[in-house]
Amino acid sequence: MTPPRPLAAADRDAVRRFLAARWGSATILLDGRAIDAAALPGFVARDGDGVAALITLLDEREHCEIVTLDAASPRNGVGTALIELAAQRARTLGLRRLLTRTTNDNLDALRFYQRREFRLHRLVPGAIDLEREADPAIPLIGRHGIALRDEISLIRDLD
Ligand SMILES: CC(C)(COP(=O)(O)OP(=O)(O)OC[C@H]1O[C@@H](n2cnc3c(N)ncnc32)[C@H](O)[C@@H]1OP(=O)(O)O)[C@@H](O)C(=O)NCCC(=O)NCCS
């Protein structure tokens, strides 16, 4: 695995394939808005022709949102490295907060983010149930056998 570095145009095809494999599609819904995560800036660790780990980022007026974060082989430290690169980049751009979203079943991500300076920010009960009405492929049961229903966002202050 290469060390994480900023995404370049030459990564786009591999990134699109990786996102499709991890999330079903590179199109991610944020508050009902369809975002093409494969076209966003971010950081990548490559593994030959493939992607070993990826973070994609959406810059808003005052904050940067993590749209996707994935490590193909977890617990190697690359997820933490990607978060720190995203925080550094956001600071350089003058953005004050790093925002991320996850789902109520993703206890690993909730733990991961809270151990990396993120705080719980917003709960949207039923957000995933609503997304499922438009996309029935979203499973009813998520990680750890927990019903997949709600969206939780977390924020890390960069000041
Ligand atoms: C969440 C995710 C991105 C974390 O990435 P990761 O590369 O596993 O993260 P890290 O390896 O940096 O840290 C994970 C844990 O492994 C530990 N770890 C890191 N390197 C390690 C090593 N060499 N040996 C043992 N443990 C190690 C870290 O300490 C950390 O545990 P901690 O939270 O108790 O400190 C990854 O698990 C993932 O892809 N999950 C599925 C997708 C997902 O849920 N995305 C985010 C929400 S949308």
Image: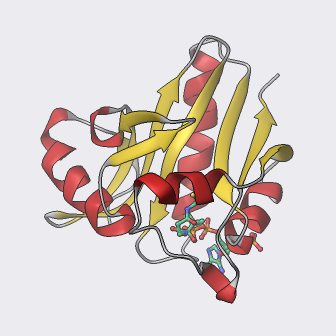
Given residues 110 and 134, the one toward you in this image is 134
Question: Which residue extends farthest bottom?
Answer: 145
The image position of residue 43, as x and y in percent, is 40, 43
The image position of residue 9, as x and y in percent, is 17, 34
Q: Is residue 141 above or below residue 37?
A: below
Regarding residue 46, the answer to whether it shows in the image is no
Given residues 123 and 132, the one toward you in this image is 132
The quarter of the picture showing ligand 1: bottom right
**What colouring style does the render use?**
secondary structure
Residue pictured at 82% horizontal, 56% vertical: 114
Q: Is residue 119 above or below residue 115?
A: above
Residue pictured at 53% horizontal, 38% vertical: 30
Residue pictured at 52% horizontal, 52% vertical: 131
Q: Is residue 46 left or right of residue 100?
A: left
| Count of number-bearing discs | 0
The image position of residue 49, as x and y in percent, is 13, 64
Given residues 99 and 76, the one toward you in this image is 99
